[in-house]
Image (cartoon, rainbow, N blue to C red):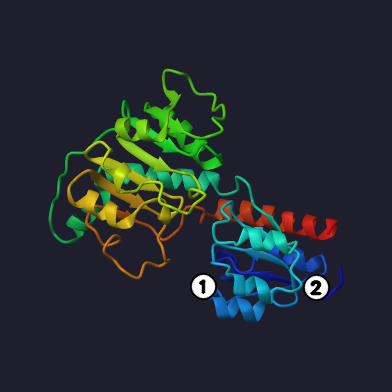
Amino acid sequence: MSADARILVTPRSLTAEPHPDIERLRENGFEIVYSRAGRTPTEDELVELVPDCVGWLAGVEPVTPRVVEAAGSLKVISRNGVGVDNLPVDMLAQRGVKVVIAEGANAPGVAELTIGMMFSAMRSIPLADAGIKAGAWPRVRGMEIRGRTVGIVGCGAIGREVARMVAALGAKVVAYDPLRPNLDLPSSQFAYREIDDILAEAEILSLHCPLPKDGSALLDRRRLVRVRDGLVLVNTARARLIDEEALIEALEDGRIGWYATDVFEPEPPVCLRLAGHPRVIATSHIGGFTAESVDRATRIAADNLLAALRNG
């Protein structure tokens, strides 16, 4: 690889301030090209930056076919997470661009945020906080997680961590995953179910899965009418897993008691019908935004990038 070979770096967490593992790429003879600091790059910005880059350490920014067409020298995209929904993977494969992911790097951070969201909803913490700051004294009867049934869709690195955490708190877990990995949890607390069975049983439901292959919503209107009244629904995976209009209807009629989400489409949300709803707990895609997760993901993504470029 020539000494002037360029690597594009676009994750918001890495453009805001330098990271030692990004500088390590420079020490390996690469020129580092950053997008705008702390901001998701636009399509036009990517088209301007990506030509002549052989590697790309990418975040969650949408990568369009136009961007890929401009990336004539690109050999590898290394994600600092596990999702590839933002990438045109078929087009990249046709052009010989390898895609690698930072498997498991964000799992502890996202899992801990998921648990925090469950507690926030079950104890109405945002409502109490806002009420006291407004001079009121709101007291809403809450729920305890011990003895509750928690549904988990997707038992990859994040989902299995959440399952273990809620089981340790005394909850019963019912889960769906097509691969049904062994989570080493006792059968008295854990069982695999089909998605529709989980919807009918779960009092708390947490999503940790990719989008269906056809891009449709996993939880559409048909499925949302099947949930138990007052369901606490947590989404730290992908906004498009849920039909937004059907979700708002379910919030309005009480089928969904609380919706806690770390993901929106687009980000930040343009319309606040959902994000501004009084029974929605919203965070700004911070699941993997911890010091530890950023360090793990950056180290793995940089290692993956270097390995792919050297092998290539």
Image: 14 above or below 126? below
Q: Say what secondary structure mark 1 lies in.
A: loop
Q: Where the N terminus falls, by quadrant?
A: bottom right
User: Do the residues bearing badges 2 and 1 touch, measured as CB atoms within 8 Å?
Assistant: no
The disc placed on residue 39 is 1
* Chain-order first, disc 2 or disc 1: 2
Q: CA distance from mark 2 to mark 1?
A: 24 Å
Residue 308 coordinates in the image, percent (x, y): 78, 57
- Report crowding for label 2: few under 14, some 14 to 19, many 20 or more residues within 10 A (C-alpha): some
For badge 1, the amino acid type reads Arg
Extreme residue in the left direction:
136
Indicate the quadrant where residue 129 lies.
Answer: bottom left
Using the rendered image of the protein, determine whether residue 128 is visible from the camera's viewpoint. Answer: no
Indicate the quadrant where residue 94 lies.
Answer: bottom right
Q: Is residue 186 left or right of 94 when viewed as pictured? A: left
Using the rendered image of the protein, determine whether residue 99 is visible from the camera's viewpoint. Answer: yes
The disc placed on residue 175 is none
Residue that numbered label 2 is attached to: 5
Residue 76 coordinates in the image, percent (x, y): 73, 62
Q: Give the camera-side residue of 209 and 185.
A: 209
Image: 105 above or below 59? above
Extreme residue in the right direction:
2
Residue 45 coordinates in the image, percent (x, y): 58, 79
Q: Residue at x 66, y 78 (%)?
A: 49
Indicate the quadrant where residue 304 lies.
Answer: bottom right
Q: Residue at x 54, y 24 (%)?
A: 184
Q: Where the C terminus falls, by quadrant?
A: bottom right
Q: Say what secondary structure mark 2 lies in.
A: loop
For badge 2, the amino acid type reads Ala
Image: 253 above or below 270? above
Residue 39 coordinates in the image, percent (x, y): 51, 73
Q: Residue at x 17, y 39 (%)?
A: 141
